[in-house]
Amino acid sequence: MTASHHHHDSSDQQEFEEEAPPVASRRRVVGAVGLAAVGAAALSACGSGSGGGSNAADAPAAPATPTDVAATEDIPVGTGVKVDKDGVQAVVGQPSKGTFTAFSPVCPHQGCQVNPSGDTYVCPCHSSVFDMSSGDVTAGPATTGLTSYPVSVRNGRVVVG
Ligand code: FES
């Protein structure tokens, strides 16, 4: 029989302080609200499309406002796609990893629309070929390149305009 020294757990510290000021957590909440407000502002800034003007020409023009046209993973490295979204017609490609380009799809020869072909764009009418990085013509009969559009990547989305 061992008479062990059982400590009665008489808690000595009865006056621990219950009132830890929640400064830290309150600060975090404020920060989160601030971020949410910024996000909402950015969203609403992008949300106003549709200026109801009638396009005189039916030829695609440069996008008036930045337009989300695709996910980055929809355009693998070394390929391009043709997009027609929210009034924006363009050919968009990723000629090298992380680098995206966008051009008007209108062939400068006689106005047909080019198609993606590997890492080039090819016109179906008379077989002009355009470089996906620069838009420059690499084979005629066209003598000038495709018209470049601004393009950027935001949160995994490709934005043209
Ligand atoms: S219209 Fe494109 S090559 Fe002629």
Image: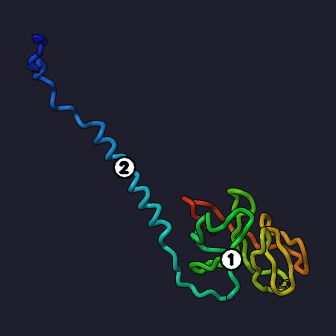
Which percent across, then down, holds residue 137?
86, 72
For label 1, the SS is strand
- Residue neighbourhood size for the residue with mark 2, other residues' Cα within 10 Å, grouped as few (<14), some (14–19), many (≥20): few
Q: Is the distance from the Cβ of mark 1 to the nearest ligand 1 atom less than 8 Å?
A: no
- Quick check: which quadrant has ligand 1? bottom right
Residue at label 1? 82
4 over 125 or under it: above or below: above
Q: Quadrant of the N terminus?
A: top left
For label 2, the SS is helix
Q: Residue at x 34, y 43 (%)?
A: 28
Q: Toward which corner of the image does residue 85 lie, by quadrant?
A: bottom right
Q: Residue at x 68, y 56 (%)?
A: 98
Q: Amino acid at mark 2?
A: Ala
**Residue nearest the viewer, comparing 37 with 90:** 90
76 over 19 or under it: above or below: below
Residue extending farthest front? 1
Cα gap from disc 1 to disc 2, whole angstroms: 39 Å
- Residue neighbourhood size for the residue with mark 1, other residues' Cα within 10 Å, grouped as few (<14), some (14–19), many (≥20): many
Q: How many marks?
A: 2
Q: Toward which corner of the image does residue 12 lie, by quadrant?
A: top left
Residue at label 2? 32
Among the two numbered marks 1 and 2 on one chain, the one whose residue lies closer to the N terminus: 2
